Image (cartoon, rainbow, N blue to C red):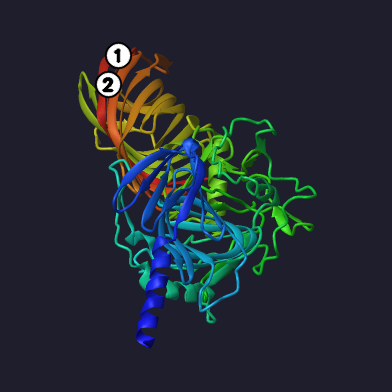
Amino acid sequence: MLLKSTFFVLSLCVSIQTLAAIKLNSGRGDISLISKNQSRQIDATKITSDINLSQDTLIITEDNSYARLSNERGDLLIIGPNSKVTIELINAPEGDFVSLHAGIIRLKVKKQRKVRDSRFDRIFVRTNSALVGLEDTDSLVLYNIYNNVTGTLTFTGKANMKRINRSHKFSAGERLVFRRSLNEQKIKFKFRTNNEIRNFSKEINDVLFGEKLKDVATVARGQYSATFHESRPVSMPVKLNPLQLSKLYPNNRLDMTVYSEDTDSEEINLSPYPLTENLFKPAEQRSSYRGQYSSSQKRYAPKAGGLVDLVSGIYIPPEKNATFNENYRVYEAREIGRINSSNGNFISPKNLTLDPNRGFLVVNNTHESIQKQSELNDLLKSNLLLASYKSVSGKKMTTAERFSSNIVGLSLVNQGHTFGYDSGDYELGKRGVELSLALMGNGSFRPFAKFRLLNENFASSSLSNNIERFYQMNLGVDYQFGSIFYVSGQLSIDEEPIVLNATSSIVSATLTNFIGEFGVKVLNLKKLDLFAKAGAKYSLANADDGFDIESGMGLYFGGKLDYWLNRYSFVFAELEYLTHSFSISGGGNDSDVDMSGAMINFGYRYSF
């Protein structure tokens, strides 16, 4: 009799769990519902009555759409645009379980009712990188599939959060398999209907709410915590900017619209300061407001008072010189971005955009935007806030960044030229050093100067020579278009050796040249750039002591290899072959001159 009663009770519990449903109440835009037996798309604006959703239902929202769900206890689950959420378990002993595969979800979970027979009224969210447990709270949970960041932002109450690996049995990755397209812009997915979470739902509950908690962050009112690193626990919760909190809190439909960053109107784009009275006031945090890092425990916290980007999950901390607000006890961010006044979303500084993996990227190359990009990415790096952020110090500069920096260089030069005269050929080479300086431009063009001090390296011993060194100077402007092409215009003043047949001697003459050059980057590797270039050279006529030099033309081609030692410095090797023709006359030295040969330049350059 006892065995039958026990079996009846267990069967009843299973039946209740199976029949229980989460209901789709309302929404906006197109919503896709995928379950074991069917797949359908509905227009949320045409929902007239609640739609029951069973376990193992995948919900997909599109651009500018959202879905509002509720369970039998009255808890609300609001799924934002471009999101994928699976209903895993409904009315399990521990509560309800959902998986967030991409996007954002807001959960308004009611106060825990009296625990009865080890049953709880919690909601659990799992992603590929974290577990989040919620009760008596209003919280946002986001997940970005590109950088594997899970973030939790709490408005009221508290939420418990713990980092997990993508391959862990708790991971949501076992439910939805993603495949990147070739251009890595679109994500293809395959939904797996097998569900094993019921086998370890109690274990998840104990991990987040048990007596012995390890590496669990409790995110309180107005605080944000996220999984920024594969090898570290979730970040210690820190206070968000009170103005952004005040704008995010009433955004119940999770409107993710970001208006143009070029709009300066305060009605649309709000500055994150000053922090006036009557703003959302976060709860006190346990970590240092200045930020902290423990190498032994691998725990870290960024500076308090920053802004969060709900799409990438990245937290942008206040700048280094931000002032501390005693009322809200946060640092006032002024230069890290703006806030959408209608929904609280983060807006990047002008001419910048925020990439989930690479941090801030330049949209329009200007000196100010590239400098701002460097400052903000260094800020993210110093606060350990980019999940798969490749260290800025380990990445070479882009072409636009190089055109917006001062670059000084020192190199060794060897010029081996053959001068063909009517009377014969002469090997007249030069070797020495070059000092170069490329001045800061606007991202597209830059001025530069080169100065060479060269010693003679003549092979001929039959000619008298009183020359010891030569001077050469180039002044020019580079202009880059696209990411791989550039053109250059230069004025060069070069001292060249001239053979005077009348006296069988070598003298120095000054040639003034106009140079036009075209270049293309033919190889772009992680630390190496290879350029190919070609140009034309026109020399002006010049009268010297005892002879005259007539104008002439020349062509050259070559290549340059840059190897980046770090973000700010590189070594380079340059090879160039030149042919140049001109004539000399007067004093019995009349002759056509064909100058040809190679130039090798090897050195080091540093940007600042």
Foreground of the two, 240 or 437: 240
Check residue 51 in the rendering and tell me which mark sits there, or answer none. Answer: none
Whether 343 is drawn above or below 136: the answer is: above
Q: Which residue is mark 1?
A: 588
Helix or strand or loop: what does disc 2 sit on?
loop
Foreground of the two, 601 or 38: 38
Residue 251 image position (x, y, % from top left): 61, 45
Q: Which residue is mark 2?
A: 501
Whether 76 is drawn above or below 47: the answer is: below
Q: Is mark 1 in CB contact (under 8 Å) with mark 2?
A: yes
Residue 319 image position (x, y, % from top left): 64, 51
The answer to whether residue 28 is visible is yes
- Quarter of the image with the N terminus in it: bottom left
What amino acid does circle 1 point to? Gly
Residue 505 image position (x, y, % from top left): 31, 27
Q: Residues within 10 Å of mark 1 (few under 14, many from 20)?
A: few
The residues tagged by marks 1 and 2 sit, at their Cα atoms, a distance apart of 7 Å
Residue drawn at point x = 55 percent, y = 48 percent: 309
- Kindly give the residue lying farthest to the left in the view shown: 424
Residue drawn at point x = 39 percent, y = 82 percent: 6
The answer to whether residue 126 is visible is no
Foreground of the two, 423 or 462: 423
Q: Residues within 10 Å of mark 2 (few under 14, many from 20)?
A: some
Residue 524 image position (x, y, % from top left): 32, 42
What amino acid does circle 2 point to? Asn
Foreground of the two, 271 or 224: 224
Helix or strand or loop: what does disc 1 sit on?
loop
Residue drawn at point x = 43 percent, y = 51 percent: 52
